Image: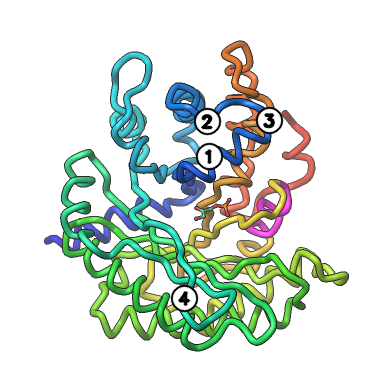
Amino acid sequence: MFRQELEAVAQAMVAKGKGILAADESMGTIKRRFDSIKIEANENNRRAYREMLFATPGLEEAISGVILFDETIRTAASDGTPFPQVLSKKGIIPGIKVDKGPVNIPGFPGEVVTEGLDGLRARVKEYKEFGAKFAKWRAVITIGDGIPTYNCLEANAHALARYAALCQEGGLVPIVEPEVLLDGHHTIERSEEATEAALRITFSTLMRHRVHLEGMILKPSMVVSGKENPRQAGVEEVAERTIRCLKRTVPAAVPGIAFLSGGQSAVSATEHLNAMNKLGPHPWQVSFSYARALQDPAIKAWKGESANVATAQKIFYHRAKMNGAARSGSYSKELEAAV
Ligand code: 13P
């Protein structure tokens, strides 16, 4: 019975035509986003910004779930309704980031492992009481000279598996996120190699830890050229390499794959998702769980001013709908232009 609930939530998270909004920026990350529009990162502005996003009319047409940050799950909208209820009233599933961010691995320069396992069982219980139905944990893998090492991949896979098992025990669907960063000079071939190695060890470890594959979602990075590499692979190549990599490593029992955007432009992230779905059908739903690629155009239009809320919401709705269309490979330049 318990497993069936996890499976039902996981399937709803990757429902056709929809994807997940990652709005779980930590205090440091939201400050960087607010710096870019020159507004202060205080509690009021954080609430106003999240309220603008969540109150967007029609958001539920293209957004199945929202990942919240610890502060946000405890915050209420200006009418007093707690954010998790604002979302669930619209049929959007609230989720929560539970990791505590990456720290350096001693003896492995340039490599990090994500912390947050201590006390996680109790935090899962608390978040469940706040209305969360799923969770997220992000592992960060860097490509560089001699890295990633096996040790780094293994340490992160272990943490992801411990986290996923604890979430399922407590009734939350884990989003398992091994992110291979696109920063660097590396080729797309190296990106594919590193992504394949990371996914291989992640799944073997998840299985060893008895994680129920039907009750989880994978959130990987796409296989793209390093940001500083002079040869930038085109949309078709990214789609083909990414799908090949996933087919080699992700069991068909997993209901869905929800990509992160990782610093791609909003339109590139939509084009890549669209091209991957055009290559389908696939054994799993191929969806999105973007933060920047969904929010960037909206935050630029908002600028922290209530007079801009309606315009920012229109832009945000459009971005969500474009990615919703990419879920079935029906996105096009014409659709993009028809605002
Ligand atoms: P981006 O889409 O901005 O990469 O963020 C997704 C996310 O949730 C990273 O953990």
Which amino acid, mark 2?
A: Ala
Q: Name the residue under label 3.
A: 300
Residue 33, position as x, y percentages in the image: 60, 38
The answer to which image quadrant residue 278 occupies is bottom right
Q: Mark 4 points at which residue?
A: 105
CB under 8 Å between discs 4 and 2: no
Q: In this view, does 82 lie to the left or right of 26?
A: left
Q: Name the residue under label 2.
A: 41
* Magenta span: 267-274
- Report the residue at 28% width, 85% height from top: 208
Q: In this view, does 147 lie to the left or right of 79?
A: right
Q: Is residue 268 magenta?
A: yes
Secondary structure found at label 3: helix
CB under 8 Å between discs 3 and 1: no
Decide which of tag 4 and tag 2 comes sooner along the chain: 2
Question: Quick one: which residue is furthest to the right in this view?
Answer: 230
Q: Mark 1 points at which residue?
A: 30
Which amino acid, mark 4?
A: Ile
Decide which of tag 4 and tag 3 comes sooner along the chain: 4
Residue 29, position as x, y percentages in the image: 54, 45
Confirm or reject: label 4 Cβ below 8 Å from ligand 1. Answer: no
